[in-house]
Image: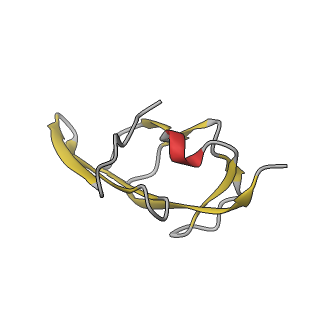
């Protein structure tokens, strides 16, 4: 699991053969934004701040998932994951 190590935010991008992938994480909220290019598949491993919480993609109408899980993104665009409460 990624660790924020006390940083106020984490931000980065990398160029892939399919285009640029960007990530922004705010551990204080916690909110994680990921943007992927067309024809790209990404596996998101949620940072430890999401552990024990339910997470929802607030940019899309996908069902909430546990922050203890990983999720696979296969549609181009931006995904913003936010904690919406404790996991059951």
Q: Is residue 44 left or right of residue 57?
A: left
54 vs 60, left or right, is right
Percent position of residue 81, x then y: 52, 59
Q: Is residue 64 left or right of residue 21?
A: right
- Residue at left 17%, top 34%? 17
Q: Quadrant of residue 4?
A: top left
Which residue extends farthest front? 6
| Residue 44 point in image, percent of width and height | 47, 39
Instruction: Please report the residue visible at 49 percent of the width from the left and 59 percent of the height from the top.
Output: 30
Looking at the picture, does residue 12 appear above or below residue 30? above
- Colour convention: secondary structure
Number of numbered discs: 0
Q: Nearer the viewer, residue 25 or 70?
A: 25
Q: From the viewer's perspective, is residue 45 above or below residue 65? A: above
Q: Residue at x 17, y 40 (%)?
A: 14
Q: Nearer the viewer, residue 27 or 44?
A: 27
Where residue 34 appears, x then y in whole percent? 37, 53
Q: Which residue occupies 34% across, 40% down?
A: 5
Q: Horizontal placement of 24 versus 2: left or right?
A: left
x%, y% of residue 49?
Answer: 53, 47
Q: Residue most toward the right?
A: 88
Q: Quadrant of residue 67?
A: top right
């Amino acid at each position: 699991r990624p660790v924020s190590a006390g940083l106020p935010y984490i931000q980065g991008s990398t160029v892939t053969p399919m285009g640029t992938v960007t990530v922004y994480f705010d551990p204080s909220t916690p909110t994680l934004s990921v943007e992927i290019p067309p024809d790209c598949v990404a596996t998101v491993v949620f940072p430890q701040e999401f552990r024990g919480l339910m997470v929802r993609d607030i940019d899309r109408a996908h069902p909430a998932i546990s922050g203890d899980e990983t999720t696979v993104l296969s549609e181009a665009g931006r995904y913003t994951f936010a904690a919406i409460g404790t996991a059951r």
